[in-house]
Amino acid sequence: PVQIFYHQAGHGGPPPMSMMNRWFTKYLHGIDNGVENDPKAQIVREGDSPQEPTAYADYPNPEAKNVTFYLQTGGNAAGVLSSNKAKTKATETLIDNVNLSGAELAQAKNSENRLLYLTPTLSEPMHLSGVAKVTVKLSSSKPAANLSVWLVSLPWDKTDRTPIYNNIITRGWADPQNYKSISKSEPLEPGKFYSVSFDLQPDDQIIPAGQQIGLMIFSSDKEFTLHPQPGTQLTIDLDGTSLTLPVVGGKKTVDSAMK
């Protein structure tokens, strides 16, 4: 039997004593208290006390269903992120600059250094639970490049000491040279398009009404990737790029929240 506890802190954070005590009572002292029948997931919701997690049947949430989102042009300012696939085909380009942080890029109204695609403003909360996945079809101007993807909640909360989940939903990174295999790489042929698919970090988050979900694609992430000289160009094929989100309630929830 297992039970998982997720908190919102950056480092550490033990489960509530009452939760641990039930496990020790059963599996240390041998007293049959039915703990194995408790909900399998305890998740501290945004803004709640770590001592008051919310119980769920499991993690990921059993009601989560994958919904795929597609990109529409305008990413140097803000393109569209929609669950409806656009009929037009297009490419958009970004220029790598490791001197700019992901937070700076996400807040920029316009930038040649990232591509940003936004959902409509949510009319009701949206619960994501599980692993988001991206497929990016790209070409590079050089044989090697970084690929970084952030899923953000906008408008950006600039409040001092704001919790990270107010701004960053999840994120992930990939080396396009490993588009075939995570264990074997090969130099990119400049100008040739490659499809790179990878998971973002697991998450369980409720995005509040009034926010927009943004998919930000950029190259070097100064916090997590190598730091090459700025200037590498990545061209993204929008028709071959998509984001899959684990949405509690699935497409029905998406349609209701984004109408």
Image: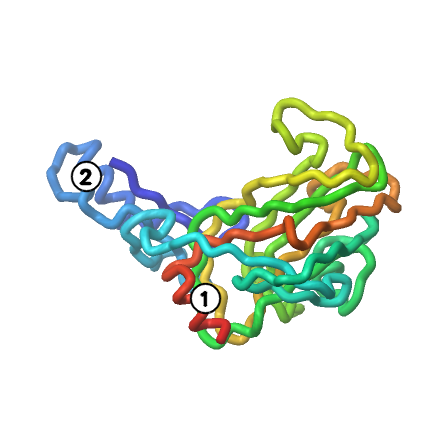
The tag earlier along the polypeptide, 1 or 2, is 2
Instruction: Locate residue 250, reporting x and y percent.
Output: 40, 60
Q: Residue reaching furthest front?
A: 87
Could you tell me which residue is drawn at 27 percent across and 51 percent down? 57
Could you tell me which residue is drawn at 61 percent across and 60 percent down? 152
Front position in the image: 126 or 29:
126
Question: Colour scheme in the image?
Answer: rainbow
Could you tell me which residue is drawn at 55 percent across and 42 percent down? 199
Q: Amino acid at mark 1?
A: Val
Q: As drawn, is 190 to the left or to the right of 78?
A: right
Instruction: Locate residue 208, reporting x and y percent.
Output: 49, 70
Secondary structure beneath disc 1?
Answer: helix
Front position in the image: 193 or 179:
193
Q: Distance from label 1 to label 2 (Cα)?
A: 42 Å
**Could you say which quadrant of the image residue 51 lies in?**
bottom left
Q: Amino acid at mark 2?
A: Thr
Instruction: Locate residue 133, reporting x and y percent.
Output: 54, 46
The residue pinned by badge 1 equals: 254
Which label number is shown at residue 25?
A: 2
* Residue 75 visible in the shown view: yes
**Could you say which quadrant of the image residue 194 lies in?**
top right
Q: Residue reaching furthest left?
A: 32
Q: Is residue 250 above or below residue 173?
A: below
Secondary structure beneath disc 2?
Answer: helix
